Amino acid sequence: MVKELLQVPTNIDSSQQEPLNVTKILREAFKLPIQNRKISISITLLMLIPFFILVLIHNRVAGSLIEKFEDHEQELAFTFSSVVTKDTRVLLVLEPVFLLFFSLISLFGMILTVRASAVIYVTKSSTVNLQELFLKIRATWKGTTITWLYISILTVAYTLIIITVSVVGFVLVDKIGSMATWFFLLLGFLAAVLYLYLAVFWTLGFIISVLEKGFYGMKAIEKARDLMRGRQIQGLVLMLFLVLLTSPISVLFYLNAFDDDLHLMARVFLGFFVTVPYCIAKIFTYMVYTVFYYECKKSHGERVEIELGGGYGSVSTN
């Protein structure tokens, strides 16, 4: 099928030609699910249902092993009984498997969210459906997965460095005294700020790999760095706001995933009402950064372009 370039001059109103500040970007992201409620509900359910089922399975299977491990923790400190060792081995196998499934569901939801947010934001369309989104995802999912793996590796590497520095810090604090405590507290604060700053590039790189063919892995992250020139502070403020907003929800979600003390019905009830805000928070985060991505493109004078059905819709940013 030959694709046409469709000019859509009325898709972005004149008020959006001026650069948006942090508040306006958040407001635009909040409008996206309202403009297409059907697709927003569909994406939420596609994330919510698998997450919820995984949480219940994790509570049932891994939760009991964690509880048994905690019960034998004192015994483990002195002996290595066959029961404890077997349970520990099973747990060490199960946890990465559950983490992989959680990550894949999250990846799928993020790709859908970015695609849907892009179409709605650029075209103001309320007619986009899941079938169209799935067709568009087929063209970029491999590159997006590669970018996601790059970001995951970078995140793990950064985390390991911070843990190593923290362990060394605790040892030095114990030997040197209070001055070292303040030094490592300051170092920890700077490390957290640096992580948020890097997370902005990584998130924007992920979005680029979803929306732009040929950009994935480090190439997508490098383009994110170029697009963010002049808007680094704005990106950092957005990330800080979203982390403060979503971190308590994420903590509750993961604590519930490991909780095996509740009755089955109570666990189902609590699991549902923890998973819902968790999924909504992740979706909102990527809606915000999709809007930010287009704002960065406009500030660099790049053409805003999105695939529409049999062709492309584009809006001049000049």
Image: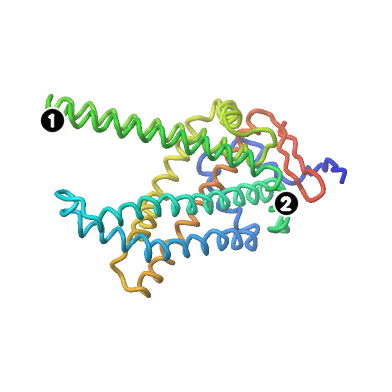
Find residue 65 and report its image quarter. Answer: bottom left
Foreground of the two, 285 or 132: 132
| Residue drawn at the location 63% of the way across and 36% of the way down | 18
Say left or right for 216 vs 49: right
Quick check: marks 2 and 1 in contact, CB under 8 Å? no
- Secondary structure of the residue carrying tag 2 is helix
Q: Position of residue 200 (x, y in %)?
A: 49, 35
Residue lying at the far front in this picture: please name it.
Answer: 82
Residue 138 relative to residue 218: left or right: right
Q: Is residue 21 above or below residue 278?
A: above
Residue 142 image offset from top left, x and y in percent: 64, 41
**What's the mark number on residue 197?**
none
Query: For the image shown, how many numbered marks are present on the structure?
Result: 2
Q: Amino acid at mark 1?
A: Asp
| Residue 264 picture location, percent across and down | 36, 73
Identify the element where label 1 is drawn.
helix
Residue holding disc 1 = 174
Q: Is 86 rendered above or below residue 301?
A: below
Q: Residue at x 53, y 30 (%)?
A: 231
**Three-letter amino acid code of the residue under disc 2:** Leu
Residue at (59, 26) in percent of width and height:
226
Cα distance, mark 2 to mark 1?
A: 58 Å
Q: Considering only order in the chain, which callout, 1 or 2, is on the residue closer to the N terminus?
A: 2
- Along the viewing direction, whichever of 34 and 67 lies nearer the viewer: 67
Judge the density around disc 2: few (<14), some (14-19), many (≥20) Cα neighbours within 10 Å: few
The residue under label 2 is 135
